[in-house]
Image (cartoon, rainbow, N blue to C red):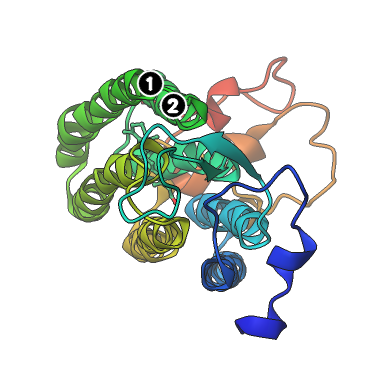
Amino acid sequence: MSGPGNQALNINNVVGQQANLQITNHGSDWYYTVCAIMGISAIAFMALAFRRPQSHRIFHYITAGICAVACIAYFAMGSNLGQVPIQAEFVRPNSHWVGAAGTREIFYARYIDWAITTPLLLLDLLLTAGLPWPTILITIFADLIMVVTGLIGALTRTSYKWGFWTFGTAAFLFVVYTLLGTARSHANALGGEPKKTYMMCGAWLTGLWFLYPIAWGLSEGGNVIHPDSEAIFYGILDIFAKPLWGALLIWGHRNINPSQLGLHIRNPEQTNEKYNQPQNGVHGPDRAVGANGAGVPTTAGAGAPTATPATNGHQV
Ligand code: RET
């Protein structure tokens, strides 16, 4: 589709907003290709979700959401949008810009994507390990520090960008510590399918995520590779990190009941509740049957004054 077919670079070529070093039509075509892959994957995961009961869709929904957000981010990047020219610290090897490094196209859209999707990827994985929610929360917090410092470093013109990269890497190592330590031992304790799925997806995720700070060092950081190569590098990583990883995770969950993971999700299909029907004003005995027959504490009779708040909780 390169050449006259893809006009994004011509149309979105705003004077004063273009970097000296930016993607070409090839980079744009590739970004649009990844955009399509993400979009198709999001639709496929939603289609798979509808084949399961509502109480068994959480991992499909999270993973579909991840791919949908990536699809939009890739649309922006293919269109040469969501970017800003930043003075590069180093002259790129073999660059035409003699004497000065010039500006490089930095896609901040990438970081908006990551700020939304990497916490969801971790949620997918850490729920599989049956981790207590405060531990999930602090891990996602560290992940957000990683993404935000990566963005600020990318927008920094001087060598101080590496300071942000260092903070980001420290935060990332905390995430890795949770994955290889705490979460792994929780998954081990669960055993069976959750353990198998966690081990597979956890190893995949950890190995893959280590390549991102390297891609950053060669692109936004060191200005070593061309923005088209940056597109290919991050694009391939993202395909492995989102649709392919997500498919493996969802496949791993085919025989896992969320209640095994401490996820007690109300299941109207099993308890014969009718949608939009008031539950006699309170959450009566129907409700107390709990998700998937999991032993949920019951309140006595329909007249019980309070609901059973724990039934929807994530109890671990
Ligand atoms: C940055 C730079 C700062 C140091 C570190 C980084 C790591 C980023 C990672 C991103 C993962 C993104 C994924 C996207 C999915 O499509 C921010 C590059 C450590 C690990 C999985």
- Above or below 205: residue 60: below
Q: CA distance from mark 2 to mark 1?
A: 5 Å
Specify the quadrant of the image occupied by residue 7: bottom right
* Label 1, residues with CA under 10 Å away: few <14, some 14-19, many ≥20: many
Q: Which residue is mark 1?
A: 164
Q: Evaluate if marks 2 and 1 touch, with contact meaning CB atoms under 8 Å apart.
A: yes
Return the residue found at the far top. 305
* Label 2, residues with CA under 10 Å away: few <14, some 14-19, many ≥20: many
Q: Earlier in the sequence, mark 2 or mark 1?
A: 2
* Mark 1 element type: helix
Q: Is residue 195 visible?
A: no
Q: Amino acid at mark 1?
A: Phe
Q: Amino acid at mark 2?
A: Gly
Residue at image point 70% right, 84% down = 4
Instruction: Residue 90 in the image: state x and y as whole percent.
Output: 36, 36
- Above or below 105: residue 36: below
Return the residue found at the far front. 99
Q: Is residue 104 visible?
A: yes
Specify the quadrant of the image occupied by residue 17: top right
Which label is found at residue 287?
Answer: none
Along the viewing direction, whichever of 139 and 209 lies nearer the viewer:
209
Picture quarter with the C terminus: top left
In the image, the residue with mark 2 has its CB under 8 Å from the nearest atom of ligand 1: yes
Residue at image point 46% right, 55% down = 227
Q: Which residue is mark 2?
A: 153
Q: Quadrant of ligand 1?
A: top left
Instruction: Residue 15 in the image: state x and y as whole percent.
Output: 77, 48
The answer to whether residue 102 is left or right of residue 284 is: left
The answer to whether residue 87 is left or right of residue 78 is: left
